[in-house]
């Protein structure tokens, strides 16, 4: 894919095209996005222009483009913790990203066979990055290191990577793709040129689904209306409607219990959240609930036309907007964001979700 073929995110595309065309390329970029909003697709298109070989870059086979991402022991790779490397998962990474560069975090975990694991980027990986960037370019041009989710680096790895970002070899480019820029080590993020990758409009999602993934107009319209600006979420909806329906079942059950002031029933739905099969599934539910509450907020502000609610769910969201306080969506989203942070910190899940439900109960 080329930059000319990217749909949406016109400001980001313009900035990247200007860099590639002028040759004035910063040594470090940070693309920050909501999960599944196309930062990887943009990165591959940009690197195709920089490297002068779109085919090799888009197929993740360019010898001078290296990828780093969080890993853990799982069903597909078992190795001593200190020996875990991104390269051990490269075939799974390549297979996933060539098929769908909009893949969600949870889909990366599934592809790696590490659902429910605490994946991270370790110090040994950072050391290998340092060694790699000082090697001579295979094809005589730029070298690039793409770091997916740098917020998952441990402190030792981040400090080691900082050395390379501060004083990179000539014609070496680092690209960070993050879903939580506030969690990236500040001394690293401050040395990167930041580019915001915006959520897509419903029309843009529908166009991407139709043109790139061959979805029918009806499928594209339905998925784009529930995706919250994320192509990855739209594709996940189409490929796994059972997951979406389960998330909606839990969300509806929870808010119905909150509206009825039935704390016992609400806590029961909290247990259902804790029983989701992996941390990634739990975080995906929190993101889903947050996006649902954004729709409620927009309806409360008399902006239903931009809420992105499907016809089938319009009555539910309109009723919920009338039942809860106007402050509830904002307060509940803050609680859900906090819960996602605690999930990453491996807090006891039953306690975590009981606490989340209690906070939402008080704010409803």
Image (tube, rainbow, N blue to C red):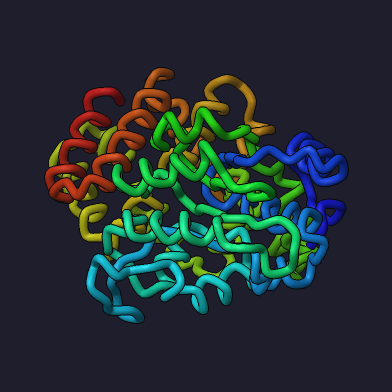
- In this rendering, would 84 be left or right of 2? left
Q: Position of residue 44 (x, y in %)?
A: 69, 58
- In this rendering, would 150 be left or right of 217? left
Q: Nearer the viewer, residue 237 or 310?
A: 237
Is residue 219 positioned above or below 282 on the image? below
Query: Measuring 34% from the left and 37% from the top, which residue is drawn there?
Result: 336
Q: Position of residue 87 (x, y in %)?
A: 46, 72
Query: Measuring 57% from the left and 42% from the top, which residue is drawn there?
Result: 33
Is residue 327 positioned above or below 230 on the image? above
Number of disc labels: 0
Q: Nearer the viewer, residue 23 or 358?
A: 23
Q: Which quadrant would the C terminus be assigned to in this image? A: top left
Q: Position of residue 339 (x, y in %)?
A: 28, 39
Q: Which quadrant would the N terminus be assigned to in this image? A: bottom right
Is residue 52 positioned above or below 93 on the image? above
Query: Measuring 71% from the left and 42% from the top, which residue is drawn there?
Result: 201
Query: Measuring 40% from the left and 44% from the top, which residue is drawn there?
Result: 151
Q: Position of residue 309 (x, y in %)?
A: 60, 42
Q: Nearer the viewer, residue 342 or 167?
A: 167
Can see residue 233?
no
Can see residue 44?
yes
- In this rendering, would 123 be left or right of 106? left
């Amino acid at each position: 894919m080329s930059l000319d073929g990217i749909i949406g995110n016109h400001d980001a595309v313009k900035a990247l095209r200007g860099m590639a065309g002028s040759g004035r390329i910063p040594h470090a970029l940070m693309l920050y996005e909501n999960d599944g909003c196309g930062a990887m697709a943009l990165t591959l298109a940009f690197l195709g222009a920089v490297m002068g070989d779109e085919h090799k870059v888009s197929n993740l086979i360019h010898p001078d483009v290296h990828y780093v991402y969080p890993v853990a022991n799982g069903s597909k790779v078992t190795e001593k913790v200190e020996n875990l490397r991104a390269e051990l998962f490269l075939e799974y990474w390549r297979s996933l990203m060539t098929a769908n560069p909009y893949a969600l975090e949870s889909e990366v975990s599934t592809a790696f066979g590490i659902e429910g694991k605490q994946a991270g980027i370790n110090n040994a990986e950072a050391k290998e990055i340092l060694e790699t960037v000082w090697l001579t370019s295979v094809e005589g041009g730029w070298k690039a290191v793409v770091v997916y989710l740098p917020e998952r680096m441990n402190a030792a790895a981040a400090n080691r990577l900082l050395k390379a970002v501060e004083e990179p070899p000539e014609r070496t480019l680092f690209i960070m793709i993050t879903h939580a820029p506030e969690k990236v080590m500040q001394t690293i993020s401050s040395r990167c040129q930041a580019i915001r990758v915006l959520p897509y409009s419903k029309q843009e999602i529908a166009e991407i689904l139709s043109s790139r993934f061959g979805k029918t107009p009806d499928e594209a319209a339905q998925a784009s209306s529930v995706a919250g600006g994320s192509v990855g979420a739209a594709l996940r909806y189409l490929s796994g409607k059972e997951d979406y329906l389960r998330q909606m079942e839990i969300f509806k059950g929870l808010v119905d219990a909150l509206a009825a002031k039935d704390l016992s029933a609400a806590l029961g739905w909290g247990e259902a959240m804790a029983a989701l099969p992996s941390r990634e599934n739990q975080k995906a539910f929190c993101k889903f609930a947050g996006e649902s509450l954004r729709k409620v907020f927009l309806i409360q502000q008399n902006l239903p036309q931009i809420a992105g609610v499907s016809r089938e769910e319009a009555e539910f969201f309109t009723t919920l907007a009338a039942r809860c306080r106007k402050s509830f969506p904002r307060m509940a989203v803050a609680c859900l964001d906090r819960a996602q942070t605690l999930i990453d910190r491996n807090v006891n899940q039953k306690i975590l979700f009981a606490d989340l439900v209690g906070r939402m109960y008080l704010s409803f």
